[in-house]
Amino acid sequence: MSKTIECYFDVGSPASYLAWTQLPDLARRHNAELVWKPMLLGGVFQATGNQSPAAIEAKSLYSRMDMQRFARRYGVTLNQNPFFPVNTLQLMRGAVAFLDTPRFNDYLTAVFNAMWVNEENMGEPEVVTRVLTAAGFDPDDVMTRASDPAVKERLKDITTEAVNRGVFGAPTLFVGDDMFFGQDRLWMVEEALA
């Protein structure tokens, strides 16, 4: 496989969720390797001066409507989480902790679905514990892994790498040096792979 799609994402981003629902099939269609890059979107916003669309009322309303259009187009459920925005620091450390393991996709499935399908308050530790337990994880093991200094440092490093590559939001995808921001640019990613 010589083609690669790199995806910088944060589970607190509904656009990252939408991209996650589509990227594995897109990569398979083009015989491309999909490289997930968990980053802390809040850290990217702080470094770049960007902010969530949720912070601007008109943009927030439009973004929600537009993302529902894409959810329908993709044939997936996207619910507006009433607890959005959620501090995702621990969740993203968890993503990094499982990044190179066979359970990475299980972790993302549990967290993304809790956030964007089941409308769970993933900023509350007891909710996270319940969600992870239901997905077959030992929440204490997840917390131990997420608290590892090497995991914390790796999340910082990936976030810094993202900023250094020009990332200002999530999801941001790269095919080689070509950058594509947003889940609504997946068709451009396909063109770049073709």
Image: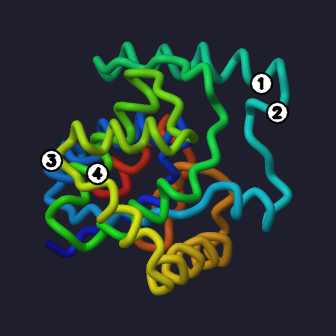
Residue 51 spot, x, y in % from top left: 79, 46
Question: What element does badge 1 sit on?
Answer: helix
Pick whichever, 69 or 159, lies toward us: 159
Judging by the rendered image, the residue that carries numbered circle 4 is 107
Ranked by sequence position, the earlier of labels 1 and 3 is: 3
Distance from the alpha carbon under mark 2 to that under mark 1: 8 Å
How many tags in the picture?
4
Ranked by sequence position, the earlier of labels 2 and 4 is: 2
Q: Residue placed at 32% from the left, 23% from the top?
A: 74
Distance from the alpha carbon under mark 1 to that under mark 3: 33 Å
Distance from the alpha carbon under mark 2 to that under mark 4: 28 Å
Pick whichever, 175 or 65, lies toward us: 65
Q: Amino acid at mark 2?
A: Ala
Q: Which numbered disc, 4 or 1, marks the residue closer to the eye?
A: 4
Ranked by sequence position, the earlier of labels 3 and 2 is: 3
Judging by the rendered image, the residue that carries numbered circle 1 is 59
Judging by the rendered image, the residue that carries numbered circle 3 is 29
Q: Amino acid at mark 4?
A: Tyr
Q: Which numbered disc, 1 or 3, marks the residue closer to the eye?
A: 1
Which quadrant would residue 83 be assigned to in this image? top right
Q: Are marks 3 and 2 in contact (CB under 8 Å)?
A: no
Q: Amino acid at mark 3?
A: Arg
Q: Amino acid at mark 1?
A: Lys
Question: What element does badge 4 sit on?
Answer: helix
Question: What element does badge 3 sit on?
Answer: helix
Pick whichever, 187 or 121, lies toward us: 121
Q: Does residue 193 appear left or right of residue 172 in this picture?
A: left
